[in-house]
């Protein structure tokens, strides 16, 4: 078979898609040939992509290079081919995927084209039948992503934000797709060994980048290797406090669990995963943990790879690890649900609600999918494991499949959450809860549906709780697909009448949300009714529907009357707006309902609506009444089998028309409002009532008479009637009620009936259209010419023309050109690439009038030409005679709808597609549950007929938009119209310009490439000429704004970005316009154009493009990829022109050859520099003049110009450095720059850069509006992405997890100096030496700059010099010498010694970090060693030195090791540890010194060398020994001075522990925490409230640490000892610590450890201090909430016994007071039982009634027992009051009576 000739497999056709078979037969027979032609055209391009052609390619996308021309046409054609549902054979998929990759992997391919190819190939790879035996080159895709989006951080060509986003948005999904098509020699093990070994959790740079790339490509489907799990788990646990890190790992775990179901024993990993899930919910820890550790985020330049969502992955993992064989997994899940249940309550909402809602929805969705697969596999007899693949869904083995018992337990856990979520105040939560309700009902209908329906019935019947009514309606709407499915719930139909009746009160004019929920339910229920009635089920519903439809219409009319009623006035006199209702929701509900009801009911309802509209007339509800008329007319027509015109048209026509004395028809004597109403209703009826031909004459008469009325609203309504009539005659659409049958068995075909215009209807439409056209001409012409005397007549004529072309678009479209007709594939003929490109873009068949051929085709052409010729005639006349009449010009443009505008995917079309997707998603769980195991395709093949109907309608709408529109074969008129639009697009009136621009840019989409380019060129010329000042010194601002608006349009802009011959002139023209635009509105337009160009700019190819060969292993040498030098010439000319503009422009923006360069306008210079910067690229070194311009501009007095030039110089030198390393590039550019950087210039440069101190770009990219939208700053942040290289000149810094302090040094300036000295080396230091020395030493080095700012700037310069200079340069003459090192070192020492104050100390620390983080072999590392050696000299803390010097030295010491690897041991760290923990240092009298000591000790804990850890361990033990809890005797013996010293040591300890855990460095600190914890508890025994606060914070953060089991055991022993301390402060401090520890390690600690925590807390319930007892009460609440049932029973029994044991004797028998011991013990029992009650604030567990009854006996006990009991009942009533009607059933009669006495008036006990 020849690939690109008309030859296909005999048993396969590309048009054989099930959707195609449902399209109208008026063009269905053309589709097969059309699909075959397009397929052959695609093959032709795929096989010969890149081959040169005899003629220059006529590219529709403005590409110049042959491969891009071919690939652009190929991508567009293939994308359209897939859009219209044509099929591809396996061989074609392989060929087309290969072709796409040949282009994608080409180095210099246009980024937008690459993004489009990636998107299209991802669509093919997502198809189930896609099979690629040879795999895909994922490594090349990865390298491409890294090069464009990650390595660009080291310096990359400018790419606009829109382009960058589109590129990564499509390349990253493609990389993920590649993991399903690995090459034969690839495996999961090989990929893990290739990428996984590079993951280093200790460094932020090496932590995320390899991990994110690994997660994209690591395969988990098939029999892929799972040996990576143990190592992955270990690596995962090495980094804490990072949700980004957790989400990536959990995503891979979840994917493996899903694709290889239960192939792995997940038991060892459950605790690791479940420990991290609660943190993803953002649950509050309350006052026990006021702060959380710092979140470690993914570096900014890698964020785009972060595609996993933690909640989504957590839900998937939880579902796919459940198995009846291992109850441990369900045990973990059960504990997780118990933890979050209370947070689902509506009154307990917060930031966590959305996360919990997402988890719930995702869990039930995954659960439904898993259960459906397992049940279908079991039913099919497949009992072994089915491993997931690209085309096969995974299924667990029989023994691991979810049993009914396990599912019952899961449902019992989740159903309460669903019911709570439905009442949530947050919309997202209620939406997800409703979806979860549907999913659970699908999984276990017998357990769920009846409960939910009962709850719904209760909610709908509730009068006092409107929120319950709204929740019930939402649930019913979502549950409809399930409970009305007889296979899932046989008795569901029985409930439907009751549900429909109960929902009618929901149509409430005063509550739009409830009304909308009601209509959503009616839409869903009616859609299901269609299936039931069509399948012969539920016939008894017919009688009910007759009565129900009557009631529904009454409610709807009442609702619409409320819309019609005048707004009510409030007491203040303001108006209350009418309720808001979505017309779309209303239309869907009514259409579904009328399609469901029986024929007789539909006809009766139509009569009722006709009577209603005949007596109404109002504007407010017109749209809704129109919807009712259109739908009911269609329903009645379908029911009667012919037409419903007799119901609506005579009634309305008789009201609109009457006869005059002569018997001539005239409009009735009605008010304008009444006339408008009836005409609009007639228009709606005409659209759908069927055969309107009998009434055609009267309708035309009514329309024409209305158009003669002076009232604008009336003659517009007449136009709408004409439009509706033409649509009713010619529009092809699905017949009403067609396709509403029930589910179709697998393999069967749906049937759709289409309403197709008959021959006589086409003819009638033609007659009507000609009459309207003639009438329009008669209205505005006199003596054969257009007469503009009467504007209203012109308006009416234009409205009529608009109605004719809009309503008659089916009649006017479809005519093909001769070229389109002849562009066909012929059997056995070779297809040229030019013809192939044309075939792929020519119009498709869509059942339009011109497609019928013969007379219809000629009529379509003739009428379109005649209509638009007349529109153009009016337009030209208006321009000539009334050039100042803007309104008339605007009206002339309204009828113009060119290109795809008449059939563009309008709002209604998009709504159809949206509805189809929404219904499909709603029914998908039901269909999956009923789908057989081996069924072909997905669940979408089994959706009910009404959904399939919507999907086919959406496809038909798409084909209409791709058909041959009017004017396609009328080139002469089309060109004339374009010329008129060009003129008006630069008109003086803004509204006229906007309308013309819209029509023009849409028309340019389909015009010839040469026409398009000529049009764009013309507007560039207009923009350029408008920037020339006239004799009066002003510009033509209107033309300037009009041309800029056109050039800014997306359609035009994309062509500008692909052609240097267009981009160069538009760039120059926009700069000239910006120079002279003084009017604010003109400046804003030009600014917007410039910003749009910047946002879409990318490197445009200026050299031959070489695509890959078919094997993707090398460049295709055979293709003729030669490119003319025109593009390169344009590129170079742009730079020359820009420099010329600067050198020849004076301060007024007027070109002057004699004007010196220094006089150039400041704005022009900055903009030229910005444009030159965006043109820098690696492949083409800039001209020496450009390099000189940037070098000199760095020293400019213009701040904006300096800013741009600094960035440009950094990028230019980075490129040049790489060029030299690659191929020894020419050094002319470097020589030019070096010649500029003389000693005198450097002095000036440093002076002006120092002036920028504090004004430069912030490292976060915040511009502060500092030089507006035209600055490079704004360009970088808003057009080139937030992580743009231009902002900081490199990757994020620092690379370690030690965060950068809040210094004032500019990383940008440091990197500028770094790249300068990395390039020029030692000789450049001689030019800088004197200036830097003066900057550091002089008292007033730079006028206008403070000494402190001068010092900061000097630090930036010195840091850059040190980081840039290399000991071994590529040019040996530039090697750094020892004298250079000494000079830089002396500068560094002088600066570090001069910094003072806190800010100076911070800046000095950052300077040291710059030195330490320098590359190996640079002067920075030598200086770092020198500085570090002095810092570690003893004594580190010299108590005799000034205080600020001590703190500064410690900060410097911290900075000197902050960026070192954990294995670092070159410095005497053990010596530092020893000295810092000495008592005289650790108890330093100054707080800020102690803060620095704590920082240093915290950092030193992260180093792993054994000698260092040994010393650290020893010193920790010494500190713990010194600060151990004191006995009473020790306190008596200690002196006052030693007490103060101990207090200061306690403060140092608290800060030390706080810093460690605040920074998340707990992985290596756990063993030390166990030793320090007793001393940390003792820190609370202090009289200084600030130190106590620090100790509490340290305990709170330490409790959140990720500790292992052994460490937890030792900590629990310490807590138990502290709980027995004689001091109440220490005992009380144990409680919040245990509360946080119990929560954060909930899934790690076993039952014994959790029991130990509870026992400690219960013990403290009996503490002698009341404050401790009450604190224990709050701590016990979450412990009981998260405890298993056995522990709850045990605790309740213990406390009940204690309560009974301490029951006081009757007061009548004895008057002795209760003993203190008994009082405390009884109080502890009351408090403990109160904690149990408060642990379930929104429910009543089975044990709670007995506890409450027991507590009632304590109401009259002595204080504080009685107060605690009363407080409990008050709190109980507050949290349980809303649901008390339901909750009270949990009590028996006696219990309820006893408890109710205390709940009647809770305020009495408050």
Image (spheres, grey):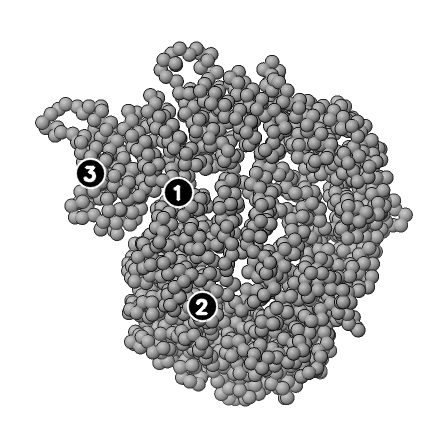
Mark toward the start of the polypeptide (3 vs 2): 2
Q: Nearer the viewer, residue 918 or 707?
A: 918
Q: Which residue is mark 1?
A: 1643
For the residues marked 3 and 2, what is the alpha-carbon distance in whole angstroms? 56 Å
Q: Is there any visible trace of residue 161 in the rendered image?
A: no
Q: Sequence order check: which comes first, mark 2 or mark 1?
A: 2
Q: Nearer the viewer, residue 1785 or 1147?
A: 1785
Q: Position of residue 1709 (x, y in %)?
A: 9, 27
Mark 2 to mark 1: distance in Å? 37 Å
State the image quarter where residue 1476 is shown.
top right
Is 1353 left, or right, of 313 in this rendering? right
- Does residue 1503 appear in the picture of this structure? yes
Whether 1174 is drawn above or below 872: the answer is above
- Front residue of this view, candidates 100 and 715: 100
From the viewer's perspective, is the residue at label 3 or at label 2 nearer? 2
- In the rendered view of the protein, which quadrant contains the C terminus? top left
The local secondary structure at tag 1 comes to loop
User: Given the current orientation, which residue lies at the most extreme front position?
Assistant: 185
Closest to the camera, between mark 2 and mark 1, is 1
**Residue 1714, position in %: x, y?**
18, 25
> Looking at this rendering, what residue extends furthest in the right direction?
1154
Residue assigned mark 3: 1750
Identify the disc placed on residue 728.
none
Is label 1 in contact with label 3 (beta carbons under 8 Å)?
no
* Percent coordinates x, y for residue 189 in the rendering: 55, 52
Q: Quadrant of residue 1261?
A: top right
Task: Mark 1: give few (<14), some (14-19) or many (20+) Cα within 10 Å.
Answer: many
Residue 1668 higher or lower than 574, as above or below: above
| Residue 1789 located left or right of residue 816 | left
Label 1 – label 3 distance at C-alpha: 33 Å
Mark 1 or 3, closer to the camera: 1
């Amino acid at each position: 078979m020849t690939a690109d000739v008309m030859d296909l497999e005999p048993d396969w056709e590309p048009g054989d898609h099930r959707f195609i078979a449902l399209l109208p037969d008026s063009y269905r027979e053309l589709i097969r040939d059309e699909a075959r032609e397009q397929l052959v055209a695609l093959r032709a391009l795929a096989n010969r992509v890149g081959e040169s052609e005899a003629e220059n390619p006529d590219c529709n996308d403005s590409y110049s290079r042959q491969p891009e021309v071919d690939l652009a046409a190929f991508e567009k054609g293939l994308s359209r081919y897939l859009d219209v549902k044509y099929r591809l054979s396996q061989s074609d998929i392989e060929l087309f995927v290969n072709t796409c990759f040949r282009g994608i992997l080409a180095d210099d391919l246009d980024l937008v084209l690459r993004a489009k190819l990636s998107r299209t190939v991802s669509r093919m790879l997502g198809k189930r039948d896609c099979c690629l035996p040879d795999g895909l080159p994922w490594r090349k895709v990865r390298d491409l992503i890294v090069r464009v989006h990650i390595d660009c951080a080291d310096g990359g060509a400018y790419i606009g934000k829109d382009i960058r986003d589109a590129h990564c948005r499509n390349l990253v999904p493609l990389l993920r797709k590649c993991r399903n098509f690995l090459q034969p020699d690839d495996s999961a093990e090989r990929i893990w060994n290739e990428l996984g070994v590079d993951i280093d959790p200790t460094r932020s740079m090496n932590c995320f980048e390899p991990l994110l790339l690994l997660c994209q490509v690591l395969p988990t489907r098939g029999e892929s290797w799972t040996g990576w799990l143990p190592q992955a788990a270990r690596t995962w646990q090495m980094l804490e406090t990072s949700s980004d890190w957790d989400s990536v790992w959990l995503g891979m775990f979840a994917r493996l669990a899903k694709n290889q179901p239960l192939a792995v024993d997940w038991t060892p990993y459950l605790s690791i995963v479940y420990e991290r899930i609660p943190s993803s919910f953002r649950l509050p820890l309350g006052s026990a943990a006021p702060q959380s550790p710092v979140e470690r985020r993914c570096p900014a330049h890698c964020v785009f790879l972060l595609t996993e969502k933690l909640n989504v992955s957590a839900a998937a993992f939880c579902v796919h690890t459940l198995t009846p064989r291992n109850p441990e997994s369900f045990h973990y899940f059960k504990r997780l649900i118990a933890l979050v249940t209370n947070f689902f309550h509506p009154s307990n909402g917060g930031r966590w609600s959305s996360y919990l809602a997402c988890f719930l929805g995702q869990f039930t969705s995954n659960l439904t999918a898993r259960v459906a697969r397992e049940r279908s596999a079991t039913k099919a007899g497949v009992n072994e494991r089915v491993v997931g693949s690209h085309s096969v869904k995974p299924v667990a083995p029989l023994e691991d499949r979810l049993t009914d018992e396990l599912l019952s337990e899961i449902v019992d856990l989740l159903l309460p959450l669903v019911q709570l979520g439905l009442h949530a105040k947050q919309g997202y939560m209620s939406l997800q809860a409703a979806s979860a309700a549907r999913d659970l009902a699908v999984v276990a209908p017998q357990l769920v549906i009846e409960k939910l329906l009962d709850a719904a019935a209760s909610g709908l019947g509730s009068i006092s709780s409107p929120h319950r009514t709204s929740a019930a309606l939402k649930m019913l709407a979502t549950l409809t697909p399930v409970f009305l499915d007889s296979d899932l719930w046989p008795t569901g139909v029985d409930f439907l009448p009751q549900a429909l009746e109960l929902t009618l009160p929901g149509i409430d004019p005063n509550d739009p949300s409830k009304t909308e929920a009601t209509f959503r339910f009616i839409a869903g229920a009616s859609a299901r009714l269609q299936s039931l009635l069509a399948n012969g089920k539920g016939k008894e519903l017919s009688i009910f529907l007759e009565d129900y439809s009557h009631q529904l219409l009454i409610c709807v009319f009442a609702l619409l009357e409320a819309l019609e009623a005048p707004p009510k006035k409030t007491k203040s006199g303001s108006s209350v707006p009418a309720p808001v209702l979505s017309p779309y929701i209303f239309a869907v509900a009514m259409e579904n309902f009328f399609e469901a009801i029986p024929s007789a009911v539909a006809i009766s309802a139509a009569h009722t609506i006709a009577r209603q509209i005949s007596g109404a007339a109002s504007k407010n509800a017109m749209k809704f009444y129109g919807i009712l008329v259109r739908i009911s007319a269609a329903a009645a027509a379908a029911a009667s089998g012919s037409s419903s015109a007799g119901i609506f048209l005579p009634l309305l026509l008789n009201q609109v028309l009457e006869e005059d004395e002569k018997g001539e028809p005239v409009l009735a004597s009605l008010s304008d409002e009444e006339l408008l109403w009836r005409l609009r209703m007639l228009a709606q009826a005409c659209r759908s009532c069927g055969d309107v031909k009998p009434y055609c004459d009267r309708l035309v008469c009514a329309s024409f008479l209305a158009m003669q009325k002076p009232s604008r609203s009336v003659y517009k309504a007449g136009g709408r009637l004409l439009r509706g009539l033409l649509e009713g005659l010619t529009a092809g659409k699905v017949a009403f009620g067609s396709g509403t049958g029930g589910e179709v068995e697998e393999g069967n075909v749906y049937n759709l009936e289409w309403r197709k215009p008959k021959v006589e209807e086409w003819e009638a439409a033609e007659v009507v259209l000609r009459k309207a056209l003639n009438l329009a001409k008669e209205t505005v012409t006199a003596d054969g010419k257009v007469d503009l005397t009467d504007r209203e007549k012109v308006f009416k004529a234009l409205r009529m023309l608009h109605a004719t072309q809009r309503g008659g678009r089916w009649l006017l479209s479809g005519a093909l050109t001769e070229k389109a007709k002849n562009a066909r594939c012929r059997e056995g003929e070779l297809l040229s690439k030019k013809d192939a490109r044309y075939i792929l873009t020519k119009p498709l068949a869509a059942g339009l009038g011109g497609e019928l051929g013969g007379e219809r085709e000629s009529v379509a052409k003739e009428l379109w030409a005649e209509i638009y010729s007349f529109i153009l005639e009016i337009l030209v006349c208006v321009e000539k005679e009334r050039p100042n009449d803007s309104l008339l010009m605007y009206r002339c443009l309204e009828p113009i709808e060119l290109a795809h505008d008449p059939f563009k995917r309008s709002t209604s079309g998009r709504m159809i597609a949206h509805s189809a997707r929404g219904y499909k998603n709603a029914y998908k769980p039901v269909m999956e549950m009923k789908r057989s195991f081996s069924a072909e395709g997905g669940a979408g093949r089994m959706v009910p007929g009404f959904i399939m109907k919507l999907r086919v309608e959406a496809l038909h709408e798409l084909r209409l938009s791709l058909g041959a529109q009017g004017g396609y074969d009328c080139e002469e008129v089309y060109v004339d119209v374009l010329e008129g639009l060009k003129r008006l697009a630069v008109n003086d009136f803004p509204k006229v310009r906007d309308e013309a621009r819209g029509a023009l840019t849409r028309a340019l989409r389909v015009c010839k490439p040469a026409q398009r380019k000529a049009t764009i060129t013309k507007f560039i010329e207009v923009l350029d000429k408008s920037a020339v000042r006239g004799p009066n010194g002003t510009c033509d601002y209107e033309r300037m704004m009009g041309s800029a608006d056109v050039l800014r349009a997306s359609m035009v802009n994309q062509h500008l970005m692909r052609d240097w011959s267009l981009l160069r002139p538009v760039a120059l023209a926009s700069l000239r316009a910006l120079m002279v635009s003084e009017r604010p509105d003109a400046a804003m337009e030009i600014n917007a154009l410039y910003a749009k160009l910047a946002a879409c700019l990318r490197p445009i190819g200026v050299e031959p493009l070489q695509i890959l060969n078919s094997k993707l292993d090398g460049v295709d040498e055979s293709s003729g990829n030669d490119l003319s030098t025109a593009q390169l010439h344009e590129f170079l000319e742009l730079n020359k022109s820009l420099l010329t503009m600067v050198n020849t422009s004076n301060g007024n923006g007027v070109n002057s050859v004699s004007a010196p360069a220094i006089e150039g306008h400041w704005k022009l210079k900055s903009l030229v520099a910005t444009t030159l910067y965006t043109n820098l690229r690696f492949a083409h070194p800039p001209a020496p003049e450009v390099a000189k311009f940037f070098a000199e501009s760095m020293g400019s007095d213009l701040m904006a110009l300096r800013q741009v030039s600094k960035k440009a110089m950094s990028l230019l030198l980075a490129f040049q450095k790489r060029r030299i390393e690659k191929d020894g590039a020419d050094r002319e550019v470097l020589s030019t720059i070096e010649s500029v950087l003389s000693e005198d210039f450097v002095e000036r440069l440093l002076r002006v850069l120092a002036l920028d101190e504090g004004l430069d770009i912030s490292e976060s990219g915040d511009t502060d509006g500092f030089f507006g939208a035209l600055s490079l700053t704004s360009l970088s942040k808003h057009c080139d992405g937030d992580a743009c290289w231009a902002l900081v000149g490199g990757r994020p810094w620092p690379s370690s997890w030690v965060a950068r302090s809040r210094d004032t040094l500019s990383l940008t300036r440091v990197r500028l100096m770094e790249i300068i000295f990395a390039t020029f080396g030692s000789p450049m230091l001689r030019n800088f030496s004197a200036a830097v020395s003066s900057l550091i030493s002089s008292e007033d080095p730079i006028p206008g700059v403070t000494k402190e700012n001068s010092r900061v700037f000097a630090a930036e310069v010195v840091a850059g010099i040190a980081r840039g200079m290399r000991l071994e340069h590529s040019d040996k003459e530039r090697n750094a010498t020892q004298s250079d090192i000494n000079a830089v070192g002396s500068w560094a020492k002088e600066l570090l010694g001069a910094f003072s104050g806190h800010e100076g100390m911070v800046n000095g620390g950052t300077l040291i970090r710059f030195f330490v983080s320098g590359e190996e072999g640079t002067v920075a590392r030598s200086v770092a060693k020198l500085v570090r050696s002095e810092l570690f000299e003893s004594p580190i803390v010299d108590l005799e030195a000034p205080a600020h010097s001590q703190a500064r030295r410690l900060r410097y010491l911290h900075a000197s090791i902050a960026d070192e690897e954990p294995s670092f041991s070159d410095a005497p760290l053990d010596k530092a540890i020893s000295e810092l923990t000495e008592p005289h240092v650790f108890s330093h009298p100054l707080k800020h010194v102690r803060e620095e000591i704590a920082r240093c000790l915290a950092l030193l804990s992260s180093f792993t060398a054994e000698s260092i850890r040994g010393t650290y361990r020893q010193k920790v033990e010494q500190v713990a020994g010194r600060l151990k809890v004191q006995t009473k005797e020790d306190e008596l013996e200690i002196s006052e001075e030693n007490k103060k010293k101990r207090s200061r040591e306690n403060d140092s300890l608290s800060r030390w522990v706080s810093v460690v855990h605040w920074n998340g460095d707990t992985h290596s600190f756990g063993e030390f925490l166990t030793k320090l914890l007793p001393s940390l508890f003792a820190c609370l025994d202090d009289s200084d409230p600030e130190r106590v606060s620090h100790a509490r914070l340290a305990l709170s953060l330490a409790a959140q640490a990720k500790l292992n089991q052994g460490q937890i055991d030792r900590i629990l022993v310490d807590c138990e000892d502290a709980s027995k301390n004689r001091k109440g402060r220490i005992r009380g401090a144990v409680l919040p610590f245990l509360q946080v520890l119990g929560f954060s390690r909930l899934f790690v600690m076993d039952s014994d450890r959790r029991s130990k925590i509870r026992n400690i807390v219960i013990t403290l319930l009996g503490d002698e201090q009341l404050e401790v007892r009450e604190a224990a009460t709050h701590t016990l609440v979450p412990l009981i909430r998260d405890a298993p049932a056995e522990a709850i029973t045990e605790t309740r029994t213990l406390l009940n016994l204690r309560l009974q044991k301490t029951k006081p004797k009757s007061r009548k028998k004895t008057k002795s007071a209760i003993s203190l011991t008994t009082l405390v013990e009884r109080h502890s029992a009351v408090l403990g039982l109160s904690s149990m009650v408060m642990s379930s604030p929104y429910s009543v567990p089975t044990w709670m009634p007995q506890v409450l009854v027991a507590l009632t006996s304590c109401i009259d006990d002595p204080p504080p027992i009685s107060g605690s009991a009363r407080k409990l009942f008050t709190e109980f009533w507050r949290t349980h009051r809303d649901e008390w009607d339901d909750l009270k059933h949990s009590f028996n009669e006696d219990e309820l009576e006893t408890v109710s006495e205390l709940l009647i008036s809770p305020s009495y006990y408050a």
